[in-house]
Image (spheres, helix red, strand yellow):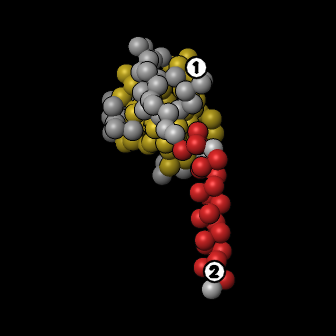
Amino acid sequence: MKNQILIWTIVACIGTLLISNPARAQLIPPAKKAAHVEISQGPEIESAKANEVIIRWTSNNPGGSDEHFGVVHYGKSATDLSQTAKSHIRLNQGHVETVFRVRVEGLEAHKTYYYKVDSQQADGTSDGVTSPVNKFATP
């Protein structure tokens, strides 16, 4: 009985919050898609361990869906970037730039890897910006 009362109390509080602040219940439409997306900083290695790295880059805000992914295409050869790592990000429509950070896991120690970065909307559509091929070595 006490658990049931607690649940109803929580439901009532949430309902009151939504009614008293209807702006929280409204969805903001997607931002207008940028005409041209370009990388302004990076990509660069933010941190590196023997079996993982974090790659970071900054681009102008690509717009479109708020749900986005930073994507890293990588491999042990500059001509074979068939492996992919993705990281979810939620765009902030009020910012002119977006910082992407992607953790690439499952790497081998003391190896050189090649990579390029991209960003995508939630439906997998590319934002139309891809970096040149870069490389890093795991410690």
Q: Nearer the viewer, residue 77 or 94?
A: 94
Let me know if residue 139 appears in the view. no
Q: Quadrant of the C terminus?
A: top right
Place of residue 110 in the rendered image (x, y in percent of width and height, measured from the top left): 54, 44
Q: Residues within 10 Å of mark 2 (few under 14, many from 20)?
A: few
Place of residue 2 in the rendered image (x, y in percent of width and height, measured from the top left): 66, 83
Q: For mark 2, give the secondary structure.
A: helix
Where residue 96 is drawn, which disc sits there?
1
In the rendered view, would you say 31 is above or below 25?
above
In the rendered view, would you say 57 is above or below 84?
above
Left or right? Give the position of 54 relative to 64.
right
Residue placed furthest toward the top: 35
Label 1 amino acid? Val
Q: Nearer the viewer, residue 75 or 38?
A: 38
In the rendered view, would you say 118 is above or below 53?
above
Residue 121 found in image quarter = top left
Place of residue 125 in the rendered image (x, y in percent of width and height, measured from the top left): 33, 31
Q: Residues within 10 Å of mark 1 (few under 14, many from 20)?
A: few
The residue singled out by tag 2 in the image is: 3
Residue 99 found in image quarter = top right
Let me know if residue 35 appears in the view. yes
Residue, x 46% and y 38% (percent of image)? 67
Residue, x 45% and y 31% (percent of image)? 29
Q: For mark 1, give the secondary structure.
A: loop
Label 2 amino acid? Asn
Q: Nearer the viewer, residue 38 or 61?
A: 61
